Image (cartoon, rainbow, N blue to C red):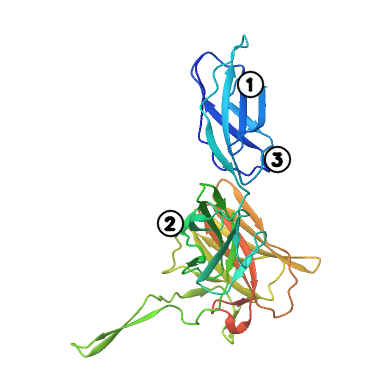
Amino acid sequence: MGKPIINKINTFDATKESTITFSYSGNQPYKNRILITNASTNDIVFDETITTMKFIHRIPSSTLENNVSYTAQISVFDVEGNESSLSDKLFFTCYSTPTFGFNDLNSTSQNTISSNNYLATVSYSQEQSRQLKSYVFYLYDATKTNLITQSDMLYYSPGSDISYTYKSLNNNTLYYLKCIGITVDGVTVDTGFVKIYANYVVSNLYSEFTLTNHKVGGYIQGISNFKPIDGTVSGAYTIENGILNLPDSSVTYKDGFLINGGHLVGISIKNPKNNVCIFQESNGIDSIKLFHHIYESLHYFKLVAENGLTNYVLYSDRIQMATNELITIYIERQENLYQLYIVRNTEENAASTEMEG
């Protein structure tokens, strides 16, 4: 019979079950035996034979000890009970599972970030002082499937911070952060997805205004990407303190207005009427409608997205809403996935697209 060959054994935590795999060429094995010895004392610590045709052998949790090195050998048995030679010894060591997580962020709930840049720091520790080797930071969108950006491969030096600055976060936008590292023993550590919501005060300027000094011509050129869009009102309206009041009418923005692909729409509103459509957008084929409802004195919003074949319906949380309280409802679209969330704000920070009624 041939001699099995054990595949590489990665470092693992002895308090958890682990699986050792091997390869073998010869008659179909019906059993396999594993022999594990202490590498320092040569004492046998685990000797087990199991009936299986698979080329694996599981090591039960707590069979071995952490911070101890071992050698493993495997033999196989054919259907008649003939045993092959033991494989060559393969050396490995068990170490405790490291801890790895973001500082100052809750891993199970949403975290609010009050800036468009965020310095993320991660803590790493391991009981036997096995060092982290390298790590990468990742930024995903609200679906956790689309990777927006990632850092370069960063290398750890003892005593240094594990950190990275996420830049240019969009306001009123949900993101997921993640950091994945590799230890000196080849063990992968992962913070898992951590949810953040970027919400910060922005300038009242509609867009950046860039000035260029043309000293040869003796003039200064100003450039802005802001483009005004005129709306058409269907009926009576008033504007008071920058707020558009539409008691029984609506406003339509059409000329010069085009939304392509994924986008974020924010509707600031106060004193909305019950059981009415407060917002609608359409490209002539697909449409999005937002309805306001009141149930048991609690306000909530219903989003209906229609594409001619199916309707996508999404409900917001129910909230209490005081008279004249200003809130913003955000509709975020990524491909065919939607997010709907509410932010309470003050009139001082409100945009000029606020509506009443």
Q: Report the residue that reaches farthest toward the bottom.
A: 218
| Numbered circle sitting on residue 202 | none
Tell me the residue at 52%/51% (across/down).
183
Q: Vertically, is 49 above or below 357?
A: above
**Badge 1 amino acid:** Thr
Question: Along the line of sight, which residue is nearer the eye, 36 or 219?
Answer: 36
Give the secondary structure at mark 2: loop
**Chain-order first, disc 2 or disc 1:** 1
Q: Position of residue 148 (x, y in %)?
A: 47, 58
Residue at the disc numbered 1: 52
Question: Along the line of sight, which residue is nearer the eye, 282 or 341?
Answer: 341
Q: Report the residue that reaches farthest toward the right.
A: 296
Q: Quadrant of residue 191?
A: bottom right
Q: Could you tell whether 67 is left or right of 89 in the image?
A: right
- In 3D space, how far apart are the residues under numbered discs 2 and 1 (Cα atoms)? 42 Å
Answer whether labels 3 and 2 touch (C-beta < 8 Å).
no
Q: Could you tell whether 26 is left or right of 208 in the image?
A: right
**Chain-order first, disc 3 or disc 2:** 3
| Numbered circle sitting on residue 153 | 2
**Badge 3 amino acid:** Ser
Residue at the disc numbered 3: 62
**Badge 2 amino acid:** Met
- In 3D space, how far apart are the residues under numbered discs 3 and 2 (Cα atoms)? 34 Å
Q: Is residue 78 visible?
A: yes
